[in-house]
Image (cartoon, rainbow, N blue to C red):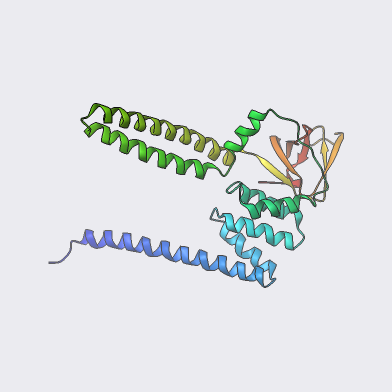
Amino acid sequence: MKKPFILYFVSFLFWGGFSVSSLAQLDLKQTFEAANQAYADGRYEDAQEGFESILVDHIHFESEFNLGNVFYKQGKLAQSILHYERARKHEPNHSDLRSNLTLANARVMDRIESLPTKGITDIWERIVAPGRHQIWFRFMVCFWTIGFISLALWIWQSKIGNRRILGTVGASFVGMGLLCALLEQSSASRIECSQEAVVMVDQASVRNEPGSASALTLFVLHEGTKVRLLQQAGDHWEVALLNGNVGWLPASDLEEI
């Protein structure tokens, strides 16, 4: 018996889409491996081109991290810190990344001490740090799975004692899953809403107002310094430092993380 045309059509869409996806993944893997080999061979410009081509259409921690290494090897401090910081948004606790970022920051001329903060604020910042959303998502799925299975068993259980235990366990795990969902959302939103940038020029003059020839220079920042973006006015950003200093910089002097 011949298959209806619609079955052929559905099969074509399924297997065709699967084949295209597989080819795309294979091409991505080959590009990444070629870039790694170029880095190992000391062909840093080729490695840079390879990693950048991946990051055009993909969020890829390894490419961001390796691109930071490439720029560091080339002596491009600002670009190196920029890509290390972008990688840290996805995996803030990666040991090699933290070591390399510390090494790169040690070469930055500006030494900015952060203002003292309340302990509870620091704890919250760590809990919902950008990059932790994946951890909270996994906990959420795990807790909800246990919770809903317990509630399903509670429905079918006839013994009072067992029903109480299953009901308590199910409700507790569903509640913990809901808490993890809120933390996951908070962490994920910080990746999108967190506006930070790196100074990309050798020396940038921070002024008291944007785009004015008579503006006063408040202080000077150097290549690789990280700032927080507050608001934009035309082609200037108002930036803040960890020590509380605030001023305006041309957008051309910055690259957003």
Residue 110 picture quarter: top right
Residue 178 picture quarter: top left
Task: Please say if 102 is above or below 129.
Answer: below
Q: Position of residue 190 (x, y in %)?
A: 58, 38
Left or right: residue 52 compared with residue 116: left
Which one is nearer the viewer's eye here, 152 or 250?
Answer: 152
Q: Position of residue 6 (x, y in %)?
A: 22, 58
Q: Which quarter shows the N terminus?
A: bottom left
- Give the residue displayed 35% in from the left and 32% down from the top: 170
Which one is nearer the viewer's eye here, 220 or 120?
Answer: 120
Residue 141 picture quarter: top left
Left or right: residue 46 compared with residue 236: left
- Give the residue displayed 51% in from the left and 64% down from the top: 28
Task: Please say if 225 is above or below 37.
Answer: above
Camera sees residue 119 = yes
- Give the residue displayed 15% in from the left and 66% down from the top: 2
Task: Please say if 6 is above or below 139.
Answer: below
Camera sees residue 235 = no
What is the total number of numbered labels drawn onto the structure image? 0
Q: Position of residue 234 (x, y in %)?
A: 71, 37
Left or right: residue 218 compared with residue 163: right
Which one is nearer the viewer's eye here, 235 or 104?
Answer: 104
Task: Please say if 62 is above or below 252.
Answer: below
Q: Position of residue 162 (x, y in %)?
A: 27, 31
Spot the residue most to the bottom: 41
